[in-house]
Amino acid sequence: MQVREILRVKGNRLLSIDPAGRATDAVATMAKENLGSLVVLEQDRMVGMLTFHELLRAIAARGGTLNDVKVADIMVKNPVTATPDMEVNDLRRTMIASGARYLPVLHDGRLIGVISFRDVAKAVLEEQDFENKMLKGYIKNWPA
């Protein structure tokens, strides 16, 4: 299974924020939309990622408040990325090795989606369920 297949099922809805935006606005958007990350775009070009992890670290470092913290001050610059033709096992290894829970997916330098570790787990589970059903059907219909 490839990343493009996960994106096809998941959809490619992308929410973003400007690097000059306020971290508190990012929190509000993420809470409203039930997201764990936002792509940071500047003039339609990805310049970073902001996840709940960076937000929590910023809150902890500032005594529980974000005040006027800008997204650019806490975002991950040059995040690890995936490609649409990347195999899921390679994607999982990349996510584990980098510690990234969210990976932007780029095709020819253009952002086409974001894959979360949850998306990967769901896709693998569904693929295994399908294979399991196929194998059970094969065994059930085995000639006696």
Image: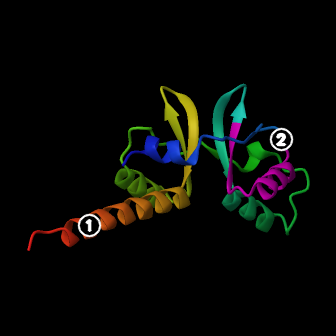
Disc 1 marks a residue whose amino acid type is: Gly
Residue with the mark numbered 1: 137
Q: Which residue is rendered at x = 14% and y = 69% of the image?
A: 142
Q: Which residue is drawn at 21% across and 65% down?
A: 138
120 sits left or right of 29 in the view: left
Q: Name the residue under label 2.
A: 21
Horizontal side of residue 6 vs 46, given as left or right = left
In front of the other: 35 or 94: 35
Task: Using the image as rendered, state which of residue 68 and residue 39 is in the foreground.
Answer: 39
Residue 13 horizontal/vertical position (percent): 66, 41
* Outermost residue to the front: 144
The image quarter containing residue 48 is top right
| SS category of the residue bearing label 2 | loop
- Give residue 61's position: percent from left, percent from top: 78, 65
Residue 5, percent across and down? 44, 44
In the picture, measured across the screen, residue 66 lies left or right of residue 112, that is: right
Is-magenta flag for residue 23?
A: yes
Seen from the viewer's position, the closer of residues 17 and 141 is: 141
| Relative horizontal placement of residue 126, taking residue 52 as reference (left or right) | left
* Stretch in magenta: 22-40
N-terminal label among 1 and 2? 2
